[in-house]
Every structure is written in structure tokens, then in C-alpha cells.
Image (cartoon, helix red, strand yellow):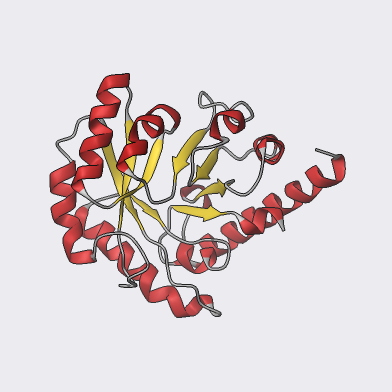
Amino acid sequence: MGLQAFTHIERNVTAIRKRIEAAASRAGRDPSGVELIAVTKSVGPSQVEALYACGVRAFGENRLPGVPEKQTMAPRDFAEWHMVGNLQRRKAREVAGLFDWVDSIDRLKLAETLQRRCEEQDSQLRVLLEVNVSGETTKNGVIPREVEGLLAAVRPLDRLSVEGVMTMAPLADEPEDVRPVFARLREVADDLGLPERSMGMSNDFEVAIEEGATQVRIGTALFL
């Protein structure tokens, strides 16, 4: 990667961190309580290397090809890797070996398959339960009233540590339009005593932070 391209990413990372700090300040929160997860599914190892050089330590992918090469630029001894997309059970073995987090647990059978693959590899995974707050049929996840039951079923799986919940808001021209979605996920997490709330992407992460996001998934805004 050339100096100009690196400088562009560095500038974007700096700008996003400032926006995270400002949003946290508006909500009376400590900005250190919000983690930037760089979604690198559409870029290559050189961009991952640049992000890592800028201090980014959490990365998200939604497919497996190319991940091992990217991890040479942000090794798991020093960075965390999140599987952020819908996960098919047949890919659980590879995911258990490559990732530190699975952010999209939406059914018990998937969790049980990951448990078995972690047992085989003597590994652990931190996981988030995916919640379909908006009710859109095109989105995965359990509806809010089913989260407690899924949590109770997954918690006995000792290779999986349930850290919190995740949702994807509908696409909206105005971020304010999806504020109720983020507020509802915060309520779900609070009711269940789960600390992590993964919500907000490039177009709406500031509103998500104001409503309690602890992880924001940023892709487009890092590279445009």
C-alpha cells in the first residue's frame, strides 16, 4: 500500500474515533466503553495492515476466504477477529479455528455445532445473540421476547461465552429513524444482564452509541 492510501485510512480512522468520542460525550459515556470493529470483508490484507498500524485491534468478517492471510497482518495474539455475518453450521469447524467471536448466534443448533467444533479443537468462542429488533423478514435473529430462552439454552455450553446481543437496524436515510431499534436492544441487554451491545454501522453508529452501543461495526466509512 502506498503512502497516500495509508494516509487516507489513517485520516478516516482518526475522524471516526472523534465521532465516537463526541457521541459518547453527548450520552455522558466514557468513549473507552465503545469498541471500533473494522469490517474488512471488502478489502485486502494491505488495508488490514494499515488499520492495525493505526491502532485498530478488532476486525469483522462475514466470509472465510482470505481471512488467514488478513490475520497475518493483525495476528490473533494482538487483535480480535469477529465473525459478523450469518453463519451456516457446515462452516462451524473453520470458524472455531479462525475467530475469537461469533456475533450472530440466532439458534441453538448453531451454538451446539460450534460447541462441538470448539471441543474438537480445544478452543473457546465469545458470542453474541443476534436479535431481530426491527422484525424485518430479510434479517436473521430471534425476536426480543425469545432472547431469554435462547440465552438459557446456550449458557450451559461451556466452550461458548455469551457476552451480549447484536442487531442490525433497517437502512434509513435519517439515522434518527432507527433510534428506537437501538434503544430496544439496550433494553434487552439490560434486562438479561448482558454487557455487550453490538449495534450501529457506518451510517448510524453515532445514534447507536447514544443509545448504549459498546461495539460499532464500521466498514464503508473507513475506506471511502
- With 23 as the anchor, is 115 left or right in this view? left
Residue 102 horizontal/vertical position (percent): 37, 42
Side of 48 relative to 3 (left or right):
left
Could you tell me which residue is drawn at 24 percent across and 41 percent down?
111
> Residue 196 appears at what percent x and percent y?
35, 50
Front-most of residues 8 and 118: 118
Q: Is residue 198 above or below residue 175?
A: above
Quarter of image, res 110? top left
Give residue 174's position: percent from left, percent from top. 54, 80
Residue at point 53%, 65% (across, down): 206
Left or right? Give the position of 43 relative to 180.
right
Q: Which residue is at a point 32% across and 28% down the rendered structure image?
A: 124
Q: Where is residue 127 drawn, in percent x and y? A: 32, 42
* Residue 117 in view in this figure: yes
Q: Is residue 18 visible?
A: no
Quadrant including the N terminus: top right
